[in-house]
Image: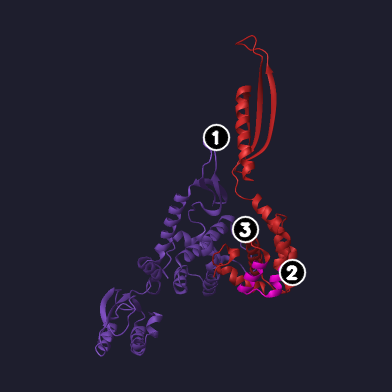
Amino acid sequence: MTCFPFAAKHPRISNHLRCRQLAELQRNSGTGRLKEGRQWKSCQVKTGTDTNPQPMFIYASPNASFILNLFVSTADERPKKTLFRVWLLPVAPSKEKKMLLVLTDEHKEHLAFLLEVDSAGKLNVAVETVQHGVEGIMYLLTESSKLMISEVDFQDSVLVLGFPEELNKLLLQLYLDNQKEIRNILSELGPNLPHYHNLEWRLDVQLASRALRQQIKPAVTFKLHLEQNGEESANVLQTDPATLLHLIQQLEQALGEMKTTHCRRVVRNIK
Amino acid sequence: MRFRFCGDLDCPDWVLAEISTLAKLSSVKMKLLCVQVLKDLLGEGIDYDKVTKLTSDAKFESGDIKASVAVLSFILSSAGKHNVDSESLSSELQQLGLPKEHTTGLCKSYEDKQTVLQEKLRESSLRLSRLESVSWRVDYTLSSSELREVNEPTVLLRFQVNGPDPASKEPIVASLTADKFRVLLTELKQAQVMMNALN
């Protein structure tokens, strides 16, 4: 159960909210799971002197209708000057959904060899079994890191294999230690487009040619260095100043898109 | 805040941050580090062992060493790029918070090597293709399968051109009759007169 930080700081909400929060927590912790499914609720609530037009993210819980009552009751006491919307978002899925790795029988067989290490630390099995075993461990770790499985879910997934408790603990420790690094390596495996490496430019003015003397013709020449999968390529481009200004304007417009409300909302929700 | 050594633009944030890292070095060590970075900018290569020794007193980690080398090469190369004299550079760096002794050390090494640095920067500017060498030969054709008595001089020219990629070196070969060659020579002489007028 999460509550966004803004709510705690808002003077009117904090006390009421905390009491209600505790009540909800006590009610829900008994069952271990939140009862209802996720719901979006959005409504306009009148409030007092707050003139900030941006939506304020207050709470995250499936059924937070008590918050609406909160606002309505307190708002009645003060003059209704501005409106703002209360967005209620669903809880992040990783906290609610149970994510289990499904291990096929083949995987279970391959990982079963882990039990066969004898006391001297030597494996008395064929090369193929070791290879399958290593591949099994690799699959287990990469899939878990890829899906960002929580500790509890990882342990439950591994329970299926029927290993002794300490082996499960070891696997969990291995997973937790290496999760970040595995994710780093996996992030570099995606498809790759040529990306920017370096840009050289020069400004020239053509003063005369064989056909015509006494000219003034400025031109900008670029050499754009790109890199893809370790290979470098260079493109030579030329433009006149008017086109260059247009190019700069378009690129600045593209950068400015990040500051629109739509983009800001998307970025906030991703974080 | 506009700075001349940044080309009349704002100073980048990372430079501001790393100037405080630089201030941790003693001014003597910083002057030696400047000398090393200047050597690198002039293409003579940088001796990383010396750099590590210089920064080991201030207990720089590898990230700090990289940052201090980067900020010094940025300051020195942009000062050379925008043709900033060492006094303005010194006052601007002090405005940014670099202590006085460090600034004087940096500006002294910059001043010593300013012309050489600017020459090097000029050479490494973008150039698409360069003419490396010209070689010529004059032949006299006596006769051919078409005509029994030809008696004509011919010039063979060979231009060795370095293309935009460092790998491509192509020779351009042409043979010209006397008249064509005369026209070429006149036009090139006119272009040379124009270039000299600009110089």
Residue A237 is situated, as x and y percent measured from the top left of the image, at 51, 46
Relative side of A162 to A69, left or right:
right
Disc 2: which residue:
B54
Sequence-first disc among 3 and 2: 2
Colour-to-chain, purple: A
Q: Amino acid at mark 2?
A: Leu
Q: Quadrant of the C terminus of chain A?
A: bottom left
Q: Nearer the viewer, mark 3 or mark 1?
A: 1
Task: Please determine whether, in this image, residue B120 is positioned above or below residue A6.
Answer: above
Q: Nearer the viewer, mark 3 or mark 2?
A: 3
User: Can residue A72 be seen at all in this image of the molecule?
Assistant: yes
Q: Which residues are magenta?
A: B87-105
Residue B190 is situated, as x and y percent measured from the top left of the image, at 61, 35
Q: Residues within 10 Å of mark 2 (few under 14, many from 20)?
A: many
Q: How far is disc 3 from disc 2 in space, using C-alphas? A: 27 Å
Residue A260 is situated, as x and y percent measured from the top left of the image, at 37, 66
Colour-to-chain, red: B
Q: Do residues under tags 3 and 1 come within 8 Å of each other at their CB atoms?
A: no
Provide the secondary structure element on which disc 1 rests. Answer: loop
Disc 3: which residue:
B81
Magenta region includes residue A135? no
Q: Amino acid at mark 3?
A: Lys
Q: Nearer the viewer, residue B178 or A146?
A: B178
Q: Amino acid at mark 1?
A: Arg
The residue that appears at 57% across and 49% down in the rendered structure is: A232
Q: Chain of mark 2?
A: B
Magenta region includes residue B89? yes
Q: How far is disc 1 from disc 2 in space, using C-alphas? A: 58 Å
Disc 1: which residue:
A210
The residue that appears at 69% across and 56% down in the rendered structure is: B117
